[in-house]
Amino acid sequence: MADRQQFARTVEPDPELKKILDASRNTPVTEEELHEQRISFAFGNAPRASEASITKDSVRLAAQKIRLLP
């Protein structure tokens, strides 16, 4: 029960963080940024046992070879 106490109260958002989020809300994401986010997501979800063989560069290389649409 003690673990749930943190959710029992309302937490005010950090004003500086809110200001940054509001400023970035209407900023468009470029194709290059989106591509890097996908690579980062794939790398972050790689199994920990494969840390030695899967690198961000290897994911980037694989992303160049794999295409979802012709």
Image (cartoon, rainbow, N blue to C red):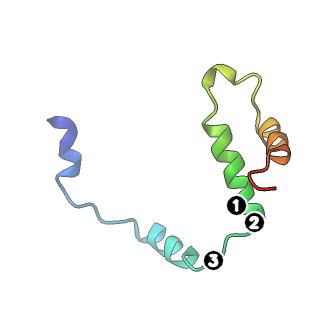
Residue ID at (85%, 44%): 65
Amino acid beneath label 3: Thr
CB under 8 Å between callouts 2 and 1? yes
Front one among 67 and 48: 67
- In the picture, the disc for residue 20 is none
Look at the picture and state if 8 lies above or below 51. below
Residue ID at (68%, 51%): 38
Where residue 20 appears, as percent x and y from the top left, is 53, 72
Where residue 46 appears, as percent x and y from the top left, is 64, 32
- Left or right, 8 with reference to 12: left
Where residue 62 appears, as percent x and y from the top left, is 81, 40
Amino acid beneath label 1: Leu
Please, what secondary structure does the residue beneath circle 3 have?
A: loop
Please state which of the two labelled residues, at mark 3 or mark 2, is closer to the viewer.
Answer: 2
Where residue 3 appears, as percent x and y from the top left, is 22, 37
Front one among 18 and 25: 25
Q: Residue furthest top?
A: 49
Q: Which residue is mark 2?
A: 31
Residue ID at (71%, 47%): 39
CA separation, marks 3 and 1? 13 Å
Front one among 28 and 1: 28
Please, what secondary structure does the residue beneath circle 1 have?
A: helix
Q: Which residue is mark 3?
A: 27
Look at the picture and state if 15 lies above or below 45. below
For disc 1, the neighbor class at 10 Å (few under 14, some 14 to 19, many from 20) is few
